[in-house]
Image (cartoon, helix red, strand yellow):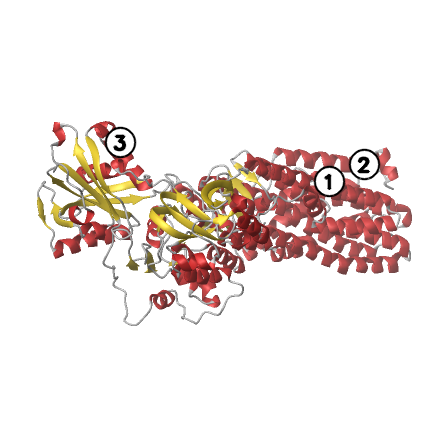
Amino acid sequence: MGGEQKKRLLSDDSVISINDEGTSTPQVTPYSKPKEGCMTGVLRLLGLKEKKKPEKDANKEKEFVEKFRQLSTLSNEEIIQRSNTYKEGLSTHEAERRLKEFGRNVIREVKPTPWYKLLFVALTHPFNIVLTIIAVVSIATKDYATFSVVMFMVLLSALLRFYEEHKSSKAFTHLKSLIKTTVTVIRTSHGCQQEMSIDMEEVVPGDIIPLKAGDVFPGDVRILESNSLFVSQSSLTGEFLPVEKQAMANDEPTSIFDTPNICLMSTNIVSGSGLGLVFETGSRTYISSISEILTSTQTTNAFDVGVKKVAYLLMGFGVVLVPIVIVINGITTKNWVDSAMFGLSVAVGLTPEMLPMILNANLAKGASDMSKKKTIVKQLHSIQNMGAMDILCSDKTGTLTEDEVKLHSHIGQDQESSDDVLYYSFLNSNYQKGLKNVLDVSIIHTHNEKFASGANVNANFKLIEEFPFDFTRRRVTVVLEPQNSESGSNLVFSCKGAVEEVLSCCSQVATNNGNTEPLTKALEHKLLRITNELNSDGLRVLCVATKSVEPQPGYEFDVKVDERDLIFLGFLAFIDPPKADCAAAIELLRSNNVQVKVLTGDNLAVAKKICKDVGIDTTRVISGPELEEVDDEDFDKIVEECTLFAKLTPIQKYNVVKALKRHKHTVGFLGDGVNDALALREADIGISVDTATNIAKDASDIILLEKSLNVINTAIRTGRITHANTIKYIKMAASSNFGNVFSMLIASAWLPFIPLQPLQMLTQNLLYDFSQIAIPWDNVDEEYLCNPHPWSVKSLFKFMVALGPLSSVFDVVIFSYMWWYLGWQTSAEQNLFQTGWYVEGLITQVFIVHMIRTEKIPFFQRWGSWQLVVNTLWVAGVCIAIPYSPLGKYLYMKMLPAMYYPGLAATFFGYFFLTQIVKKIYVRIVGEWL
């Protein structure tokens, strides 16, 4: 397996594993069946059938796998010849020619959206388009008042959205660091070979580059020479440990990242040295293929789809009902011009004019609230999606874990803690000359914490010889000479490395009483079993051995002779521990009905251990190589059921998110590496952090200033509050306006005059809309915040049908009261009739929000925010006062007599009482209110 660990998890307790560092004998679980592949077992346990996988379209990843596999098998001479270059390097003239031919070594990036595009998107919101159409018709009919009010709403809404998104875009731009990276290349100038430092953008295919610790690979590179070369691929895979790379391929790679002699652009060298050949740059590199998909993919999100469907629903009602109103009113009144103007007013009344403004005010307030809680919102719609999110896909490293490898345990053969194991591993890590990796740092830190004398240990020993790590031995040994009498006079050998390889050098094993015993086959099997158990728990395992020899002046050490007859001391187990608050945060996500799925490039056993520790169910898990063998039909079902996906490639992460969206989930994705960028872009909510790679931040909708699930929980709550207040307005406005149209139909067929003047209807709508401006600041029931609430046109349609006609019932009641009891039946009393319906319609509309905003009984069990209550009261006051003011004459209104108000009160309280009854029935049938 080339040093990689491949684990296939069939169920919670059945694992087939082929282990890496320090492991040997495969662990075979009770579940096994002759001649049945592991993949078949996985599918069978998931209730699926194994099928031949169809070819996927445009799978660039497969092309790279095949290309890298071919290149890895070539000898140094063949790869140099294929690249048409020389081991001494390209000439400066040839490099310039290739730079013109292949272009600069840059990859495509997602550029910030220009301000004019942000403005265009804000103006072309679906509801703004509906309102603009109404405004155009108004100006064509010389209804300047309607045109002015409607266009004012359109511009105010669009400018508010543009301002917030432009501000967020500027805040995000400040997070990006613009750093010029230089690269050392070997080139020939005037016949002389020399190393020169150039800008990374000027590297060309065929360049020879020296490799040293700290360097970032400027392109896809084939290793020509290597000396203990360790490369960090964490930005692409998520694995926190560096991987070994060497000049010759000795294994068949299982994935792009497993190719032992090929390194990818953007990865970096942790330790060692070597020589490399750049064979691809710029747009032809693997990382550029990710960026290309990222910049060319057009994705949809749940919020945009939901808003468009709501707009189309209301437009559909308008197209059907408005002509009916015009025809009925025209036949009844015989005045087709006034009827057409009245129909236009009905169209305005049917459309929730303030929806774009209320929507954007909600989003702007949500963005402001989130900015105070360590969150920058790049795309305003992501706030709504955050509230609707029911699945959060997260990477492992740095989110579930501390992103800091720690020494978990140091134990002897009896599996009890051993100070000797820690001490001799410290000697090895402290004195080796190579660059210390994260495991060495963890060993030294743990030792110095435990032993006060650890800081002075350098004075006790002197490094005499080192047998450095190589790919064959997979261990490092240091030979130390004591510098004081307390440490004795003999030379101390300290060997640390993979378990199997260290055991091959041992002849004895230390016991817990300070003695030793021979290393028998039975004892060796026991030690390997312990290793397997530690690996199954998700721990990285190394072991330590030692011996003491008398010094011999002038002796020349030989690794083949001296690295023998060691005494096995015990095991070192490492882990990237889970964050202290992670389990509580995941439990809170669960209580908020958000399922967490972990998508990681790390190996399965490690990821499974972490998931168990933080409370994520690991009954159904799968690895990337297994997922690659699944056909499209079964792929969707596996993605739906599994909670942990390990050893995933970037494109596999993207496909998992896409499959979840196909199942109508609102999906969030949290990631910070290049390997996460595609999934971030595809998700309904892409969430990254300010320390993420630029390509990840480019692809995200929300930037966290702290990588924590607790911050996400806070954002989810903010999103749900925003969604609740938005849906309140939509359902209330849509159902109320829908009911008004029914009332218009009834009134048009009944009355010999139009039931409302167009100007009266416009004023009524305007005052009603002003009363709803406070909705973004309203309270939300705690019960509502416990569940995700995606946009649902079906839910809106049911609400409109159930609540809309209810308002028409009481409109008919006030019609009857005015027509028969008050006797307003002739054209002479039409202004009184119109004024009476104007007041009743607006009063019931502005107060009905208190019925709709909560499932509970308003004013008794739940109150709205003070802002909403105050807004409701002043609008109601203005509504009643207008007929008695000079404005009333301009609006063709008459002062209402005292006898009108008993009818208004009966209508008002009857409407509230009946609405509460219908609410209870609706919730029982439908299962939800908002």
**Relative to the observer, which residue lies in front, 846 or 152?**
152
Q: Secondary structure at mark 3?
A: helix
Q: Which mark is residue 449?
A: 3
Mark closer to the observer (2, 3): 3
Q: Is residue 885 left or right of residue 39?
A: right
State whether residue 329 is above or below residue 373.
below
Q: Amino acid at mark 1?
A: Leu
Q: Which of the two labelled residues, at mark 1 and mark 3, occupies the earlier sequence position?
A: 1
**Relative to the observer, which residue lies in front, 161 or 343?**
161
Q: Amino acid at mark 2?
A: Ile
Which residue is located at x 65 percent, y 45 percent? 729
Task: Give neighbour class at mark 1: few <14, some 14-19, many 20+ (Cα, 10 Å).
Answer: some
Q: Secondary structure at mark 1?
A: helix
Q: Which residue is mark 2?
A: 882
State whether residue 178 is above or below residue 728.
above
Quarter location, residue 8: bottom left
> Quick one: quadrant of the N terminus?
bottom left
Q: Which of the two labelled residues, at mark 2 and mark 3, occupies the earlier sequence position?
A: 3
Q: Secondary structure at mark 2?
A: helix
**Relative to the observer, which residue lies in front, 832 or 674?**
674
Q: Is residue 352 left or right of residue 618?
A: right
Q: Position of residue 464 (x, y in %)?
A: 20, 36
Q: Position of residue 657 (x, y in %)?
A: 50, 55
Task: Give neighbour class at mark 2: few <14, some 14-19, many 20+ (Cα, 10 Å).
Answer: some
Q: Amino acid at mark 3?
A: Glu
